[in-house]
Each structure stands twice: as structure tokens, then as C-alpha cells.
Image (cartoon, rainbow, N blue to C red):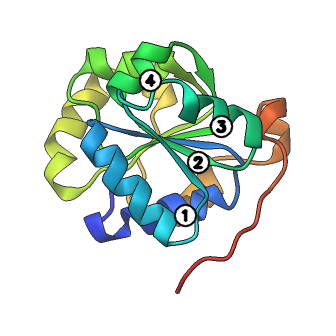
Amino acid sequence: MLDRSERESSILRLATVVPQLVVITRTDAVSCDLGERLLLRGLPVVVGTAETGEMPLRAFRSDGVSTLVASDNYLSQLGHLEAGLVVHARIASSRKDYYRRLADVVSPVHITLVVPEDEKPARRLIHHLDKETVIDLTDDQAIDVLIDLTESTLPASARSKRRFPLAR
């Protein structure tokens, strides 16, 4: 749970820990908008939409430092992808969509950023998920304590930290 205004800051903070981050949005338009805002804040971003084809995915896989911001539809069209961390910028609209996201992007950790208007759907979705795999965080500082994002828990492709200047 976090305020809508804290979403980008939370993504940036996570991106400093994990070299290749995938951010999932609901639509291509939101992917473009969020990708642009993150890029303006200093994060190396590749945006994947239905119109961009496979080029963003190739760039993401080859450079080793970009964050891929993509919609549900883009990721499901391209099939299987592996990442060190996946951030769901908005909660999936259904249980089926959520499980499809998990299948499309395999990662040791999936974090869903729940903004106030998504609180009720998030609570409903949690009841349909495996209780042992869901950690309900109310304070984004708790992410560092509860989720181990050290090199030993990440896939080999995501084991080096990256640093980039953040605009203040």
C-alpha cells in the first residue's frame, strides 16, 4: 500500500538494488507515460508496447541495466521473460490476469504497488492466492527487511548492482 505519488520513487529505489527490473502496467498508454516519467527521473528505461515489437525486449536483454516498462498485452505477446524483480505498477484486474503476469515474467519476487483505489480489488485478489507467497506490506520501508534481494537470491543475469544519478 502506498500513495499514488510514491509509486515512481518506490520503483526507483528498487531499481537501484536490482539491475534489471520489469514494471508491468495495464495498458500501452500507461506504459509510455510511466516510462517517460521514470526516464526523466534518471532511470534507464525501455518501453514495450504493441506497436514497438520485439526491439525493447532485445534492448532490455542485451544492455543489462535497463528497466523494461511494458503492458500486460505486450508481455503476453512475447512469451517467457526472466527478471530479477517484477513490479506491478497497478494490480491486475483479475486473478487470471495476475497468474498470466506471473507466467509471462518469471522472477523470484513480484511486488504489487497498491494505490488507494486498488485496495479493495487487492484484498479480493489476495484471498485467491497462495497465502505463504503473499506478504502484505503497509510501509514501503519494510521491503528491504522482508524481501531478500541480495545477489544469492537473484538469477545469474541479475546479480550486479547498478548505480545511476537520481534527479532530486
Whether 131 is drawn above or below 59: the answer is: above
Q: Secondary structure at mark 2?
A: strand
Q: Secondary structure at mark 4?
A: helix
Q: Nearer the viewer, residue 122 or 10?
A: 10
Q: Are marks 4 and 2 in contact (CB under 8 Å)?
A: no
The three-letter amino acid code for the residue at tag 4 is: Leu
Work out whether residue 8 can be spotted: yes
Q: Which residue is mark 4?
A: 75
The three-letter amino acid code for the residue at tag 1 is: Leu
Whole-angstrom CA distance, mark 3 to mark 4, is 14 Å
The three-letter amino acid code for the residue at tag 3 is: Ala
Work out whether residue 140 can be spotted: no
The residue carrying pointer 4 sits among few (fewer than 14), some (14 to 19) or many (20 or more) residues within 10 Å by Cα, namely many
Q: Nearer the viewer, residue 119 or 5?
A: 5
Q: Are marks 1 and 2 in contact (CB under 8 Å)?
A: no
Q: Are marks 3 and 2 in contact (CB under 8 Å)?
A: no
Considering every residue shown, the one lying at the far bottom of the view is: 168
Q: Which sits earlier in the primary sequence, circle 3 or circle 2?
A: 3
Q: Which sits earlier in the primary sequence, circle 1 or circle 2?
A: 1
The three-letter amino acid code for the residue at tag 2 is: Thr
In percent of width and height, residue 137 lies at: 42, 53
Q: Which sits earlier in the primary sequence, circle 3 or circle 4?
A: 3
Q: Nearer the viewer, residue 13 or 73?
A: 73
Give me the disc on residue 59. Answer: 3
Q: Is residue 57 left or right of residue 122?
A: right
Give me the disc on residue 12. Answer: 1
Q: Residue at x 67, y 44 (%)?
A: 20
Q: Which residue is mark 2?
A: 67
Q: Which sits earlier in the primary sequence, circle 4 or circle 2?
A: 2
